[in-house]
Amino acid sequence: MADKDLQLREKKELQTEAEHTKPGLVFTPTVDIFESEEEITVLADMPGVASDGVTIDLHNNELKISGEVEDQGSEKERYLLREYDIGRFHRHFTISDRIDQSKISASMKDGVLRLVLPKAEKAKPKRIEVKAE
Amino acid sequence: MAVVKWKPGIFGWHRDPFSEMDRLRREMDRIFGVYTGAREMAPAAGVFPALNMSEDDHNLYVRAELPGVAPENIEITTKENNLILKGERKIAAEGKKVSYHRKERDAGNFRRIISLPTRVDSDKVTAACKNGVLTVTLPKAPEAKPRQIAVKSE
């Protein structure tokens, strides 16, 4: 994996039927989602989002992740080259497992959100024994 | 006849006119690309990472979004009028007990060189990473800074 080169990918703008209440661009963060027996983990790339700019909303199995970005640079600067746009992030998922809401934890590091959603007792897998007759 | 998908966001809301014009231009490029059968608009260089460059009277600023790249894994070099960004994005393995629903994030190396439009004072270049956004500040060389010339009356 280490000798692979990163490919340039354009940031994806959020496509939605609903209109946004706030002006500005909205992008969908790229994510990794994986689960173990105990928890579901979401990693989301949200460059420019500080830890206090993240909003996580879990309601009726719908998980919404939003991130507000800070401006890059000051108003005095003039652009010479512009290959990417800046805007806030938003993405939403449905989660089929039951999540223990009280134990959700989230952290931001270097612009990556790590969200850990522990499964509620009932949602943990039960091993089903197959009996030979 | 190519059908161009309407995208909300071109005229949907108001932004500052400068960025609006810039976006309109890019949107036109994108549409034109569709008509000629070319690939969707590729950013200027097609090399990771995408860069924004700006200037004020004293400095050039080069910015890149590098989420998940630790500052110690970024190497910045200036050579003559070029800026070289090298680095590696590492994604730690999560162990064998997990199964993936989605895996959209990539790990890997990047190397990009960009030529600078003015001479810079390479001894005073600084770089900072904040929330996954890298900012390289390159002070302009004295001869490249704007100078005000007073007009004397005789």
Image (cartoon, coloured by chain):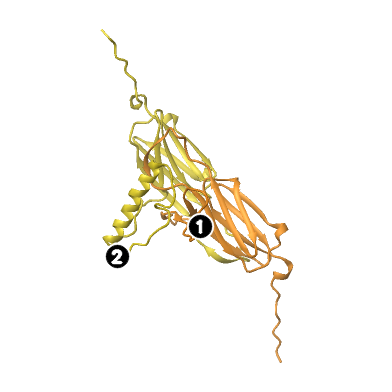
Chain colours: A orange, B yellow
Residue at the (59%, 58%) spot, across then down:
A64
Residue at screen point 39% across, 28% down: B57
Q: Secondary structure at mark 2?
A: loop
The alpha-carbon separation of the residues under discs 1 and 2 comes to 29 Å
The amino acid at mark 2 is Ala
Task: Tell me where residue A62 sits by quadrant.
Answer: bottom right
Q: How many marks?
A: 2
Coordinates of residue A104 in the picture (x, y in percent): 68, 57
Q: Amino acid at mark 1?
A: Thr
Identify the element where label 1 is drawn. loop
Q: Say yes or no: labels 1 and 2 on the same chain.
A: no
Q: Position of residue A86 (x, y in %)?
A: 46, 46
> Residue A56, position in %: x, y?
62, 54
- For disc 2, the marked residue is B2
Q: Is residue B128 left or right of residue B9?
A: right
Question: Label 1: which residue?
Answer: A30
Question: What label sits on residue B24 in the rendered view?
Answer: none
How busy is the neighbourhood of tag 1: few (under 14 within 10 Å), some, or many (20 plus)?
some
Residue at position x 45%, y 52% from top? B109
Drawn side of residue B61 relative to residue B72, left or right: left
Name the one closer to the observer, A21 or B126: A21
> The N terminus of chain B appears in which quarter of the rendering?
bottom left
**The one of A21 and A122 positioned closer to us in this rendering:** A21
Residue A43 on image: x %, y %: 57, 56
- Residue A36 visible from this viewpoint: yes
Of residue B96 and residue B58, the one placed in the foreground of this image is B58
State the quadrant of the C terminus of chain B.
top left
